[in-house]
Structures are given as structure tokens and as C-alpha cells.
Image (cartoon, rainbow, N blue to C red):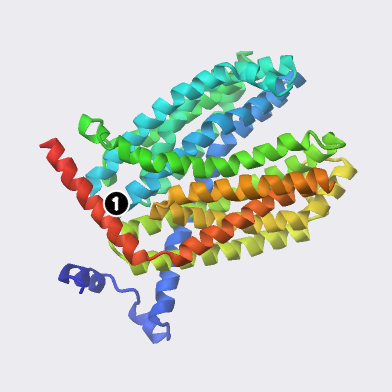
Amino acid sequence: MESSGEMSKEEAAPLLTKSEENNGVTPLEGAFWLELKRVGSMAAPMVAVTVSQYLLQVVSLMMVGHLGILVSFSGVAIASSFAEVTGFSVLLGMAGALETLCGQTYGAEEFRKLGNYTCCAIVTLILVCLPISLVWIFTDKILLLFGQDPEISNVAREYCICLIPSLFGYAVLQSLTRYFQTQSMIFPMVFSSIAVLCLHIPICWVLVFKLGLGHVGAAYAIAISYWLNAIGLGLYMNYSSACEKTKIVFTSNALRNIPEFCRYAIPSGLMFCFEWWSFELLTLLAGLLPNPQLETSVLSVCLNTTTLHYFIPYAVGASASTRVSNELGAGNAKAAQGAVRVVVILGIAEAIIVSTFFICCRHILGYAYSNDKEVIDYVAEMVPLLCVSVTADSLIGALSGIARGGGFQQMGAYVNLGAYYLGGVPMGLLLGFVLKLNAKGLWMGTLTGSILQVIILAIVTVLTDWQKEATKARERIVENSITSHNGFA
């Protein structure tokens, strides 16, 4: 039986207006369109946030490219990939734990806990940066083990060492990003990210060219920009009345939640990294194929294209995570289910639109990256596979967001490990090397992993008892609130 408080809340916020009733809109249709509006209003600006943050590294790479020193450009390109795999992807994945903890806490209106969890995330991720920094100091030795050129490896080491301050800024930034995201406060992040991107261009130009720091200046520019973004969001949180109830306060009581944060952060990081690392492995394997220059170039085009596209489903997934976690925290199982339906439909629609665009542009897509006719024709042959990848990515983005919102990161980590490393990578090796399908075979193997991931996550989502998950979320929040109060007392 529903409590009178819940009844009054529903009566105070009806799903349908009288005009909708007069137009013959059913309650189910009204709820669908209302949820679609909520998800869409979050997803669109989140695309701007993620793209703006990603472009900081792209701009720095482009600046180094215009130095005209090939060894610097190659070293920075390899260093950027190395930094993503060993550092930024780990922090980005672990920060996903806040989408569960902060989202459900905000839905339950336990506002003080939201700031506490964010405090835990900042401290934990900064600590994680320490071993990553040690790995970056030995970048050249690690790259030499993989047969890289010594001169290029040395440049990569210099770049990664100068990039270490950006690692700590990124840890704070991703924590604050989830803090705002789970409260549906998107526009402070949009303004901050775009403003910093606009500042990053002249800062990078001055450091690289005017001060003559070269590739080292490009790394410093990224660090400055990440910290500017983090400081901007921190100032907004500290002085805005909208954040008064959820303000982050660094106290010993807040840090007691670190073990709980880690229970979600570690599988969340593994869930994200298992998928990301499989695609990086794909590029390494391409170098072992016959005619590696052509095969690697084509795979690079495909990977860059899917990476740029992934910002859209990632933003949809972020919206899904926020909506699902908020509703579970509030104990609204039906609303959480409604959000799941809307997000999956939105993912399917987005996949159809983007795939249609790629099919129509398949003969000119390669020109965006190369003037080589052989590369362009090969890319055109890969487009049908690319469209399947786009469809899989769209659904993965939505379903992964639902998993983070529901707190299923541990299951998601096992799913990604099995899908990519027991299914996708072995299949890619078989098709690419044994059956000699080359780049197509490697891509089909990874695509097999993506499809397996979609199928398993879809089954998990369909079989989830959302009422049970809402009850579990409420019980966990209440239990932690009692423990926190007792500890504080």
C-alpha cells in the first residue's frame, strides 16, 4: 500500500495535463513523452560536455603536428594512446561508481550523503593517480618492450611525465562531473567545458610555439585546462545556492564511505576498461598483419569514427544512469522501468539514423582521414561492419548506463571480460590471422564481443526486478544514513 506522502506527491505532479487528456493522449503515452523529454534534455548537453573534454587532447596533438617534427608528433600520438589506456580510462571508469551512489542518494533526498560520496571519490581517485604516475615515468621502457622506436619512446616518456599533473586534475574533474550529472545540473558543466576548450587553444599555442616548449608545452596545456575546468566547477558548487544542500565537505566522517565507494568503483572501472582495452589491442594486432600500413590505417579510421560516435550513446547512457538511479533511490520502480524503456528506444533510433548516414556516405567517409585511394576504398568495404558496430555501441551506451544506475557494475565487469576476451579477441585472431580476413576479421572479432555484450546486458535488464532493486536501494541508503549518524555522534 502506498503512503499518503507518496500519494500526495503523485497528485501534486500529474503526468498529464488537461490539454493532453483532451487530445486523446493515454497515461502511458504521456509518461513516455515526459520521460523522453527528461532524457533528451540531459543527453544533448552531455554530448557537448564529453566532446569538449575529449577535444583538449585532440587540440594538443594537432598543435604538435603543426610543429613539423615527425618524431614529436609520433611520440605524442603514442603517448596519448598510452595515457588513455593506463590512466584516463581507469579514472573515468571508476568515477562511474558515483552514478550509482550519488544518483540513488539524490533520489532518496539524502542530500548530505551526495557530497560525502563525491568527497570519497576525489580522495580515492587521487590516490589511484599515484601508481599510475609511476607507470608513466617508465613509459619509454614499457614502449621499448613492445618494439617501439627508442627516439619516439623518449618523446612519449617526456610527454607522459609532463602530463602527470593533468591526471590529478582529471580525477577531480570526473568526480565533480558525476556530482553535477546525478543532480541533473548539466549546464554548469556545459558552460565550464566549452569555456575551457576556448581557453585551451590560445594557452596551448602560447606554450607550444611562443614559449618554444614544443610537445612538452602541449602536455602542460592539457594539465592547465583540466584544472581550470575542475576549479570552475568547484567554485560553482561552493557559491551556488543550487548546491547548498549537497555541498562537498572534506571531513573524516565523509571519508568513512571510501570502502563502500570502492565496492562499486573497482568493478565500474573494470567494466569500462575491459571494453576500451579490447579496441586498443585491436590496433596492436593490426601491426602484425600483412601490409600493416594499410590494415592499421583502415582500422585507425574505423576506431576514430566509432570513438567520435560513442559520445552520443555515452551521453544517453549518462542520462539513463541518472534517471534510473534517481528513481530507484526515491523508491519509484515503475518510473525507473519507464526510463529504461525510453533509453533503449532512443538508443535504437540513434543507431538507425547514424547507420543510415554512414551507408549513404560510405564512398566519401575515407576522405575525412586520407587521400589514398586504396584506404578510401577499403574503408567503404568496412562501412557495413561499421554500421553494425554503431548499432551495438548505441545499445551498449544505453544498457551500460542502466547498469551503472542500478548498481550492476560487478556483473557488467564479468560480462565485458567474457564477451571481449573469451569471445571477441579469440574470434578476431581466428578470422584475422587463421582465415586471413585481415582487418575485417579483427573488426568482426571485436564486433562479436560487442554483440555478446549487448545480448547479455539486455537479458539482465529484462530479467531485473525493478521493485526489488528499488527496495534494496532504499534499504542501503537508510542503513548507511543510520551508520553515518551513529559514527558522527
Q: In the depicted view, which residue is nearer to us: 235 or 356? A: 356
Please determine whether, in this image, residue 148 is positioned above or below residue 184. Answer: above
Residue pictured at 50% horizontal, 28% vertical: 225
Instruction: Give the residue furthest to the right.
Output: 373
Nearest the eye: 480 or 50: 480
Query: x and y percent of residue 243 in the render?
Result: 28, 44
Which amino acid type corresponds to the residue marked 1 in the rendered image? Answer: Tyr
Name which quarter of the figure residue 41 lies in: bottom left
* Residue that label 1 marks: 106
Q: Could you say which quadrant of the image residue 232 lies in?
A: top left
Q: In which quarter of the image is the C terminus?
A: top left
Q: Position of residue 361 (x, y in %)?
A: 78, 56
SS type, badge 1: helix
From the top left corner, tell me how far across and down residue 317 is, in percent: 49, 54
Q: How many marks?
A: 1
Label 1 packing within 10 angstroms: few (<14), some (14-19), many (20+):
many
Residue 184 appears in the rendering: yes
Which corner quadrant holds the N terminus? bottom left
Q: Of residues 398 and 233, which is closer to you in this image?
A: 398
Quadrant assignment, res 463: bottom left
In the picture provided, is 401 more to the left or to the right than 335?
right
Q: Report whether 309 appears left or right of 255.
A: right
